[in-house]
Image (tube, coloured by chain):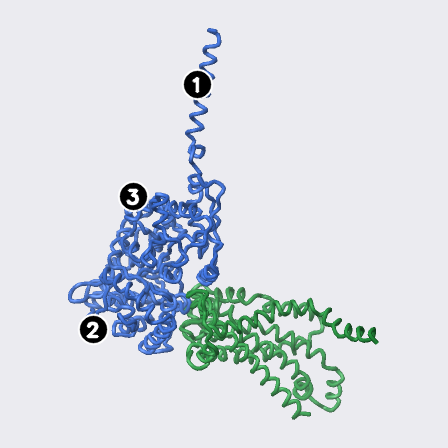
Amino acid sequence: MRGSALALKRKQWEPLAFASPSLFLITLIIVFPLGYSFYLSLLNFDLAVGPDAEFVGLRNYTEALLRDERFLGSIWNTAVIIVPSLALELLLGLLIALLLSRVIHGRPIVTALLAIPAMVSPVMAAMAWRMMFGVKFGAINNLGRQLGIIDVYFDWFATPFLSIVAVVLVEIWHNTPFMMLVLLAGLQSIPQELYQAAKADGANAWQSFWFVTLPLLKFTMAVGVMIRMIDLTKIFGLIFILTFGGPGGSTETVAFNTYLVGFKDFRMSYAAALSYVIVLGVLALTLVFMWISRHREARAA
Amino acid sequence: MKRFRPATCVAILLAALITFGWLAVPDRAPGARPYEGTTIRAVVNAEYVKYSLTLVEKDLYDTLGVKLETEVIPADAFVAKTLLEFNSGSSPWDLIMFGPSNMPDYGRHFEPLDPWIEKMKLNFHLDDIVDVFRKVMLRYNGKLVSMPYDGDIHIMYWNKVAFERPDNQKKFKAKYGYDLKPPKTWKQWDDAAEFFHGWGWDGSPNKLFGAGASYKPSGSGYSYHWWRERFFAYGGNYFDATMKPLINTAAGLRALEEMVRTMPYYPPGVLLFESEEPKTMLVKGEVPMLCSWTSTGKRVGNPAESVIVGKAGFGIVPGAEIDGKIVHRPPITPGRGMAVSKYSKKKEATMKVLEFISLPEQSLKIVMDAKTIMDPWRVSHLRSEKFRKLFPDADKYLDAIEQSFPFLVPDPVIPAADEYQRKLSFEITEALAKRKSPKDALDTAAKEWDKVTERRGLEKQKAFWGEKLHEMKSLGIEYRPDWAAKAK
């Protein structure tokens, strides 16, 4: 009786014991920083003032969401960068993936070559493009002059609109390969029999794409878009190097604004609160996106 | 006995020579290298500042036996990282570089110098420090806590070719009705910028630009320097005695409206220019005039990169004509200081290091080297014959710096000084990018300033500002509400 009770107890704690090193690590590197930064977001800790800080409850959150026009503006700026970037990355990624799926010889090499931009760090990509966008000596302006389109003195960062265009262009160059790889994997998982059946039913190429490829690729597309959306919400390196949030505050994204608040204004508690607002925002967006996807799937079924 | 006498004499002579020689070698002299084996850790915000310390490193070791270990924390993270360490009540560094406008946030972490000056008989040659720097850069709560390291101010540079070509002079006079000369007022500056923009004023077929500037937004505060040299000339000041911001008064508005109106005469890319881009355009002969840091002069005089060596003019930044007299208000922008950490465990050696690197002859080496971007801050730097002959017209360059000193305007050196500047700078760039009208931008900046004041505590800020207001008054800077309308 006693033996079986011990065995039962052991059964209960054994999995926990095996998992404990991982749990300890997770607590140390994920749960603790998250918990601590949340605690920090409820204080008014300012690096320049000193280590003493008071508990202010949700004041930082209400300031961020109700009174901080610059932060609210940065949400809009982020959206303005995210929407065209995501749309064009998806379209171009799909186009390239479709073309690649038809390549029979040397596909791995072509795919690897096309994926190179995604392997470059955002900071490196931004540095390279900053030089390419350069006035007078930049490659783009010089090419533009030879083609008779633009002057070498054309300033890609002269106006808010142009700066956003420049940021979106670099973003697309940098991350379309990721979308392409995801969609290519999705395309290759579609059984060929379905295309053969569609062909036998008299479907042309467009109908095959519309009625076979697209429905079966929807889930992969949703995953790709979701990953990119989460990533784009945190866009920082590109902005830091390319525009530093300017001209004015036209390309100041939420992540960049948080950096300025934390590391320039030294308002660590407020920056922690902003980070939580961003995390919650991304979480909400992801949930909405997932809900829409499921809802549509359910309706289609 | 007789046989040994010469040999003995030679031996004695040799022994004496060796002994004298040993004693005469400076690094073997008794008392030399008193801190042999000591390593002092310094922290700076750029590689070129680290490089500047290498210029005195050898002499420092030969004299004190101290080795310097310099850590570079990039400027963007410098203040946050160093303050984080200090706020924990410790610091891995003994010697700290800092921006003087951050003094109210840093000062309590610095070791006061006076007790050590008395105890160790240190000589910082305080009388040799330029008056305005001595007044505004060195003290915290009335106590001497730092020494200048970089005397940053703005002066005006111009390309003589642009201003002296007879053809240009004729055209300018025909268009504006007065002689083309290096501008003395902002009105003349704006006219010249308009005149020179878009054509080869050097006689070449090239498309050249009207003037240079740095308007990079947000974290850097560049545009703020260019705005305040106009703002103060039009009678502005940061706050009144009650801490009400005065930046959105008529002086501020006029300054910003002029900057917005003349934007087309500046080079493409100016909205994202940091300090070095317009300097390069000046030395390459692409802009005819530039208000810039004093370090620019050394680039102007460097034949390896400059096409205007011997063809450049140097002067005080333009001002405004008020009642027939020109008022100049060049800014301190903002410079660098060096201090000893309160938490250092090697305070005595660090004090000696600070004294050594601040010595007139050692600091001269640093400010003369173009690669350091450090600027003169001692009177003896400006008078040094070696410096005055460093490049063609170096004497005129140093005279222009000296001429500017009596009119310098400091930053608002109160707690959160950086934050005030950045909020304002951001709004200035919002107006320059035409995302807001100048009035909206300055009103928003004033509101942001109120928020910072409220957060930091109105009474505390008022007390700090009261001191600064007094200091500024002693420099001849007061709010003059009537000047904005009067200024020509």
Disc 1 target residue = B13
Q: Could you tell me how many numbered marks the image carries?
A: 3
Disc 3 target residue = B385
Is residue B416 left or right of A188 when viewed as pictured?
Answer: left
Q: Are marks 1 and 3 on the same chain?
A: yes
Which quadrant of the structure image shows residue B349? top left
Which quadrant of the structure image shows residue A225? bottom right
Disc 2 target residue = B485
Q: Is residue B307 visible?
A: no
- Chain of the residue where label 3 is placed in the rendered structure: B
Is residue B275 left or right of A85 when viewed as pictured?
Answer: left
Sequence-first tag of 2 and 3: 3
Q: Nearer the viewer, residue A45 or B165?
A: A45
Chain identifier for the green-coloured part of the image: A
Q: Are marks 2 and 3 on the same chain?
A: yes
- Badge 1 marks a residue whose secondary structure is helix
Q: Is residue B286 above or below residue B24?
A: below
Which colour denotes chain B?
blue
**Which amino acid, mark 1?**
Leu
As measured in the structure, the alpha-carbon distance from the residue carrying label 1 to the one carrying label 3 is 43 Å
Identify the mark at residue B23; answer none if there is no mark. Answer: none
Which quadrant of the structure image shows residue B462? bottom left
Q: Is residue B12 visible?
A: yes
Q: Classify 10 Å Cα crowding around label 2: few (below 14), some (14-19), many (20 and above).
A: few
Tell me whether the residue at label 2 lies in contact with that at label 3, contact meaning CB atoms closer than 8 angstroms.
no
Q: Position of residue B408 (x, y in %)?
A: 27, 59
Query: Which residue is at 29% across, 46% downward?
Result: B380
Q: Position of residue A111 (x, y in %)?
A: 66, 70
Q: Is residue B24 above or below residue B144?
A: above
- Chain of the residue where label 2 is placed in the rendered structure: B
Q: Position of residue A61 (x, y in %)?
A: 47, 78
